[in-house]
Image: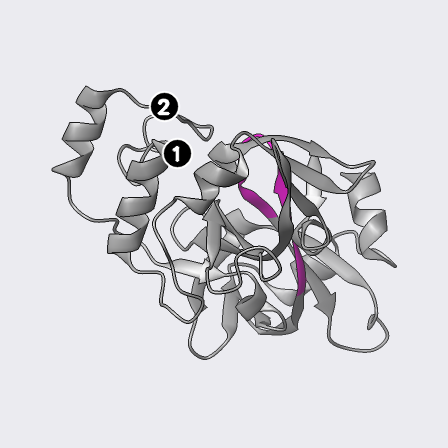
Amino acid sequence: MLYFTTDLNTYHIEASDGQMGKIQDLYFDDKKWVVRYAVLDARKWLPTRRILLSPAAFASIDTDNQQIDVKHDKETVRNSPSIPVDATFSKDLEMALTGYYGWSRYWLGGLLWGVEDMPGVNIDDQELEAQEMSNEPEHNLRSENDTWEFRVHANDGKIGDVADFIIDDSYWKIRYIVIQKAHLPSEDRFLALKVDIIQSVDWLGGDIYIDSDLEDLNDQTDYESKEAIIEAL
């Protein structure tokens, strides 16, 4: 099933023994455009901690109740490696976190999640030992929140601004970038472009470059609302 990442930001995170908070942000890697962690707003429960969970920890998405069910109980999450609210999420912390939960280290291997295409858990001791000896991740994690209103450019001009992302709940890959078109008479209309045609990103400057021309993009279907995109896909 496909979801807007902005919609997931309204969902509650439900542990096996109670609610933990809402999704505050999503971290995706800048190589494969796959969501690696959900950052929880858990201030009411653990006010000094930042809680990150891999999609490997998710049991299901309950759209009726707008919640994501997690496989762990609250005590397991509470005892996870401590990440202070104001701390930078470093590669060392990521290694500690994946080691604690037993999540497969997705940067090993050529598939979306390392040796698998889907998020995996409970790797065996031999694999964990081999991963401990491996190199650090060769990627950067990017904040979904930080990409809002990034400018999107074709080869010959600006298309518009980032309005959302669309992900699937099997692989947790960002499938489409949703763009609010920039120019009259098409303002307030949206395009959904596959991330495969992204040529490069200036993460500091806030610019995304698409390998396409404006004329070709004008021939693509645009939509009056974001909701119409999901209905059409």
Residue 225 in the image, given as x and y percentages of width and height: 85, 57
Can you say whether 72 is above or below 221 in the image?
above
Q: How many marks?
A: 2
Element type at mark 2: loop
Name the residue located 40 percent from the left edge and 64 percent from the top edge.
Answer: 84
Residue under label 1: 113
Crowd tier of the residue under label 2, counting other residues whose Cα lies within 10 Å: few below 14, some 14–19, many 20 or above: few
Residue under label 2: 122
Numbered disc in front, either 2 or 1: 2
Can you say whether 170 is above or below 12 in the image?
above
Q: Which residues are magenta?
A: 163-175
Name the residue located 72 percent from the left edge and 41 percent from the top edge.
Answer: 67
Which one is in front, 70 or 176?
70
Q: With 13 as the anchor, is 187 left or right in this view? A: right
The answer for how far apart the CA atoms under marks 2 and 1 are is 14 Å
Which one is in front, 92 or 118?
92
Which one is in front, 227 or 183?
227
Give the residue type that dot 2 points to. Answer: Asn
Can you tell which quarter of the image residue 233 is in?
top right
Q: With 177 as the anchor, is 64 left or right in this view? A: right
Residue 148 in the image, given as x and y percentages of width and height: 61, 69
Name the residue located 28 percent from the left edge and 46 percent from the top edge.
Answer: 96
Name the residue located 47 percent from the left edge and 65 percent from the top edge.
Answer: 48
Residue 19 in the image, given as x and y percentages of width and height: 66, 43
Q: With 167 as the anchor, is 81 left or right in this view? A: left
Give the residue type that dot 1 points to. Answer: Trp
Crowd tier of the residue under label 1, counting other residues whose Cα lies within 10 Å: few below 14, some 14–19, many 20 or above: many
Q: Is residue 66 visible?
A: yes
